[in-house]
Amino acid sequence: MERTTKLETAQKIMGKNFIGPEELVKISQFLKIAIPKGFPNVPFEKSFLKKIKKDYILILGISKDKNGKALTINRMREIFGTDPKKSEPCFYNQDWYLKEKFADKETLDFNWYLISKKVEDKTRSKDPNTIIKNLNNKQSLPSAVLSAFTFFTYYLLKRGILWEKDFIWCKDQDANGDRIYVGRYKDVKKINKNGFNIHRHLSIRHYYGFAPEYCPEFKS
């Protein structure tokens, strides 16, 4: 039994949820990328792709831009900016992560990735460690750079917004060991501007505590 699928076959199976070399060429001027030659076979069986084709995106990862610069989250931030009044899609205007390894160093390999288009309802409001414990041996949390790359390529190609009002947990952690989560392009309360968000889930540590305030017994 073949464990891989030819590019053309995978493209036919996945349909609009396929982002391969042809699709990336169409938006290369916006992503400022050059597509390498010699594409790897898709590392998923045809039968499996047929089962998940409606809910997942199969995407070819790119590690560098056309000038050979690493295609990190920070590089994508330079490309798309942080002001929705100037252009969309864009990143939400935050700078806390700029020196973090997951944003400044991590890139995708030139390989295929498979990522869900939506949050699984059964995982909503659950702690990420609980979710990780219940993953099967073929599942993992996506990286932040994969999530960002998929979000922006899908937006440019399909004019669709992935995880529009949801956050998704990522496998990355910041320098303090706090879990990264991304997404929620639009604020449901319409308080914040549009933008691809990147946050960290603060862990409770020994330097968090209670500093009491005594309230007066009588008001003057």
Image (cartoon, rainbow, N blue to C red):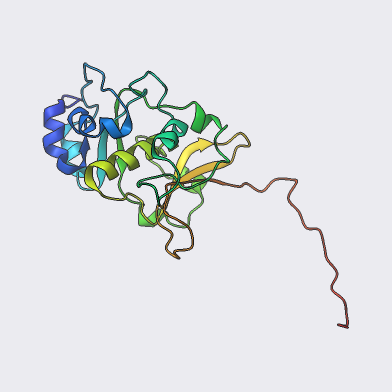
Position of residue 195 measured from the top left corner of the image (x, y, whole percent) = 42, 49
Position of residue 202 measured from the top left corner of the image (x, y, whole percent) = 61, 47
Residue 38 falls left or right of residue 134:
left
Residue 111 falls left or right of residue 17:
right
Q: Nearer the viewer, residue 142 or 35?
A: 35
Q: Quadrant of the N terminus?
A: top left
Residue 25 position by quadrant: top left
Residue 159 falls left or right of residue 146:
left
Position of residue 53 measured from the top left corner of the image (x, y, whole percent) = 19, 43
Q: Does residue 143 appear in this view?
A: no
Q: Is residue 169 above or below residue 172?
A: below
Q: Is residue 54 above or below residue 72?
A: below
Q: Residue furthest front?
A: 86
Q: Does residue 74 appear in this view?
A: yes
Q: What residue is drawn where x is 46% and y is 27%?
A: 106
Q: Nearer the viewer, residue 194 or 167?
A: 194
Position of residue 168 measured from the top left corner of the image (x, y, whole percent) = 42, 48
Q: Quadrant of the C terminus?
A: bottom right
Q: What residue is drawn where x is 29% and y is 45%?
A: 155
Q: Is residue 70 above or below residue 15?
A: above
Q: What residue is drawn where x is 48% and y is 54%?
A: 126
